[in-house]
Amino acid sequence: MSESTPPHVPESSGQIGVDQWVAQADERRERPAGLRGLVATGWEKLPPAGKLALLSPAIVIPFLPFVSEGNLFNYGLFILIYALLGLGLNVVVGFAGLLDLGYVAFFGFGAYTYAFLSGTHESKGHIYTHHWPAQWSILTAVLVCAVLGLFLGSSSRRLLGDYLAIVTLFFGQAFVVLTNAANPYGITNGSNGLANVAPLEFFGHLSINSTRGYYWFLLGCVAFVLIVLYCISESRTGRAWKASREDPLAAEMMGMPVNRLKIMAFSLGAAIAGLAGSVFAAAQTGAFPQNFGTQVLILIYAVVILGGTGSLTGMIVGAIAIIASNQVLDSTSPPNVARVLFYAALIATIFFTMRSSWPRMATAFVGTAAFGFAVHAFADAVWARGTAGEATSGGFLSGAIRHWVLLPAHPGRLAVYGYLLMVVAVITLVQLKGWWRLAVLVPTLYLTAFVWENLLVLQPAVTRYVLFGALLIAVMTIRPQGLFGTAKVEIV
Amino acid sequence: MNLGGLVVALAVWTLYAVYLSPTHGWTFFFQLTVNGIILGSVYALIALGYSMVYGILKLLNFAHGDVYMIGAFIGFGVLTLLGGPLNPAIPVVLLIACMFAIAMIGAGLLGLAIERFAYRPLRNAPRIAPLISALGVAFFLENSALLLFGSQFRDYDGFDLVSYNGIHLGGDSGVFIQYLGVIVIVGAFILMLGLIGLVQWTRLGKAMRAVSFDREAAAMMGIDPDRVIAATFFIGSALAGAAGVMFGLLFSQIYHLMGFLAGLKGFTAAVVGGIGSIPGAMLGGLLVGLVESWARGYLNGNVSDLVVFGVLIGVMLLRPSGLLGTPALQKV
Amino acid sequence: MATRLLELKGVSKAFGGLQVISNLDFHVDENEIVSVIGPNGAGKTTLFNLVTGVYTPDRGEIMFEGESIVGLPPNRITRKGVARTFQTLRLFLNMTVKENVMAAAYGHTRAGVLRSVLRTPGMRREEREIGKLAEEKLAFFGQRLMGYRWNQPAYSLSYANRRRLEIARAMATNARLLLLDEPAAGMNPVETREITELIGKLRDELGYTIFVIEHDMHLVEGISDRVVALDHGIRIAEGSFDEVATDPSVVEAYLGLRAKEEPG
């Protein structure tokens, strides 16, 4: 610095208060008070390994002897498979920032490749018996998916983000056509799918036959993939993915081959889906077209979005939350668990929407209960048919429900109108504030209970997809980073 | 590839189909072409909604196909309420007009609600957020329809309602155009003319063009972008609702998943024509309808969707801005 | 004569009907600081975009170190040694300051996915080197981007610091030629003076060749070995700052026709 620049800039401008002010920003940042704040800060400070350790009970529980084989299959295996799928999709959506709506097709290709190579089937006059050992068929399935990912990813070379979404959606559709309708040379056995698939058998003697065995094996796969992805995300490639998600053009100008990186992400994600698919096919000893439809795609997206795009631990938590609720709402599960969860959610809604003011919260509780009994009493007096029905397999809650919720003998159209009204009421509710919100909340909650008891509980399998659809919207509008993601700043 | 290339490709294809293909002959070709144009009118209406919303928000509205599905159901509801196809309570012309009007208004309102609830809160979110929200809306609508209406096919019985007859061109063995098809083509034509008029000559149309060009600048010029976007959603969804009724009249397969493929094809049409361009969406719709119809006739019905998909990929690779779109320049 | 680092021969570029650059001959010598000035819309940023490969020229040749770089994808051009900053800042906002710089080392580092997963010694050594490189580049800006700032996300930086970070990021690509697009835009006079000195140091101490677009005439005057004035894609003047600043056609381009009426 010379004499010619009179207003001399001090080299160490660190002394000027401004910078310390910035340096201590974290200490000044407002934390949620009390227990919630403590938990939030504690969680943030935990290293990734610690986070996983805290989550491990959820992983260990299935090993306890009281968990039945069926539950272990329905919950344990599915949670792990979706955790794998979530981790793979997370590479594409979370790391590279690409929307892949054909992801489920890779899951399917993996399963079909394994089933084709390790099983027996006959179709259109062709007989296929390969019975490859598992290590080769899994490897092939993973490679096939990786190559397909390369192929699909390279179509993204010239496509803007949104177009890619549609091309991948078509790719998923092409898979459905291929397996369901086209069945070239009897390879896919059409809509019947491939049954008679051999369970995992490595190198001729190391075979897995029990659900518990598959659970262990999948747990190993998840841990392996988790470590691999963690290592990659902390490497040169991980940084380049992040950079090209943030600003593809700037990344390209800084020497990163953005297209190659995108294709790589696609391929890696697809390979993980292929792994998940082949283990899935082995565990259920078959691969059927209906295993790989749009519903599955939405489930995987729900896992990734709820868990938080870009977060690895989030995928595990997301898979546990989504798959557990998916299985609870399965039509084969007893409806009581779902019912308990539903009323718990109803109470949680009051807490959540009224958390700013205790009096309102209390009013909401009392009001909702009173409103229900009042409506019920009124209906009893003027419209006997409205309370003539029975709660569907009510269990220990059935008594309370009978006296609170309107249960018409044949709900029929009434339930349909109730549903439509409920959707309108929820949309209205979101727009309102203060006491108005409270005033609408009470009847809305009651209406929700009415719709639940008369319509939703009868078709839990459909209900869950409605809920997952709503979940995607809700997470995006309320907390786009999901449970474990970090909030992103985007300057448009 | 440009319009000239398109004309050449169509001419070559026509010659092949008429003279060389296994099922050659003019009648077969023209019959498929007519069917394609009818189908294409439906796709064009869907594509218009896609294209308008994309033009103004740069958002792929995945839920658009499901708005179309809901439109078809509303049309069915109106038809049932007014006595059904066999003994309608009011004159048939009036009944069809009612179906269109109510389905369009209903679908339009649904579009408004979707925009307000699922997209508006995400106006300044990362690009991927509204896409995922749109996916959620699509899934929500599909499964709500399944919940409320069940999984069986509903049938307008359009032939009972209108007529089994039609126009014969070139004698009894010639090309046959049902009256239903005529209604669809004429209806689509009127709606498109109305839309062009609206966009070109009304204040709202000007505001829409301004907002799609530069939302912030338009806001500074006193245009309320939220209202313009809402209006765009209303109009686009209403067109989808009309398309739903048309599909119901023609094909009698109303069910909760009908919106998925139709939405994809509508989108394909919008991209082929040049997304954001209104004449492009119409041209694209016609092309997709024709390609699908030809693929069904000359190839195998199962693969017609894949052929449409191939066309989409081809256009995206050869001419990413579509036939009538303007290439987007990357600003640095 | 000094070696030619960058050379453009007869380069033209049109968008639609608009000729943005027409038949431009131009060169930057090794270890030189060249400024491009010109009114808005003169084609300055387009010139940068042509050199870095965002656009390909309609006609003409662009040579870097004697090799043609026309038609190469931008990341290849960067690896050959041309890096740039952006007029409208384009940082990786949600990455930390240090990560921003580390990411730019991608082009000249090797460790692939497999080695990253296996954490081979070579890969870990490379990671350490990348880290050191980033710290070194950031240290160039004094205390501004040091210490706790390393781990702050880029979006928390002030405007001037973002400009500095962009330069650090471009340096980390190991480029020999830096293209700076309005490095002083949005800075106050003190900061402008500081960045002027820094650009001088970039050349004198670190040996970079610098090609800069700038509207701030104090900066241009302070650093330029040579100034090129563009208008409507045509070079209207070239030479030292004083020569160009007094050139009648430059004055005309900036101020309109009045200059012609005056003698001199």
Image: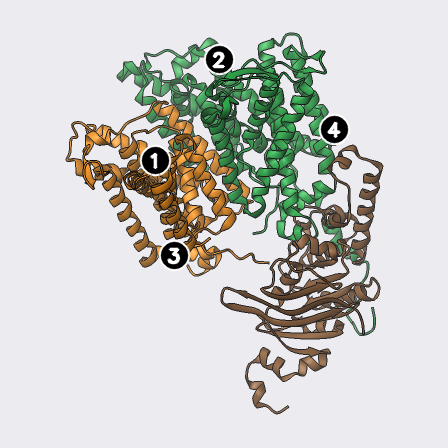
Chain colours: A green, B orange, C brown
Using the image, determine if residue B82 lies above or below residue A153.
above
- The amino acid on which the numbered mark 4 sits, given as a three-letter code, is Ala
Q: Chain of mark 1?
A: B
Distance between mark 2 and mark 1 Cα atoms:
51 Å
Residue under disc 2 on the same chain as residue under disc 1: no
Residue under disc 1 on the same chain as residue under disc 4: no
Distance between mark 3 and mark 2 Cα atoms:
54 Å
Look at mark 3 in the image and give the residue it sits on.
B207
Q: Bin the neighbour count of mark 2 within 10 Å (Cα to Cα): few under 14, some 14-19, many 20 and up.
A: few
Distance between mark 3 and mark 4 Cα atoms:
54 Å
Q: Bin the neighbour count of mark 3 within 10 Å (Cα to Cα): few under 14, some 14-19, many 20 and up.
A: many
- Say the numbered circle drawn on residue A49: 4
Callout 2–callout 1 Cβ contact below 8 Å: no
- Residue B16: x %, y % from top left: 38, 43
Look at mark 2 in the image and give the residue it sits on.
A332
Q: Chain of mark 2?
A: A
Q: Residue A403's quadrant in the figure?
A: top left
| Quarter of the image with the C terminus of chain C in it | bottom right
Q: Nearer the viewer, residue A113 or B247?
A: A113
Look at mark 1 in the image and give the residue it sits on.
B23
Element under disc 3: helix
Element under disc 2: loop
Distance between mark 1 and mark 3 Cα atoms:
51 Å
Q: Earlier in the sequence, mark 2 or mark 4?
A: 4
Q: Bin the neighbour count of mark 4 within 10 Å (Cα to Cα): few under 14, some 14-19, many 20 and up.
A: few
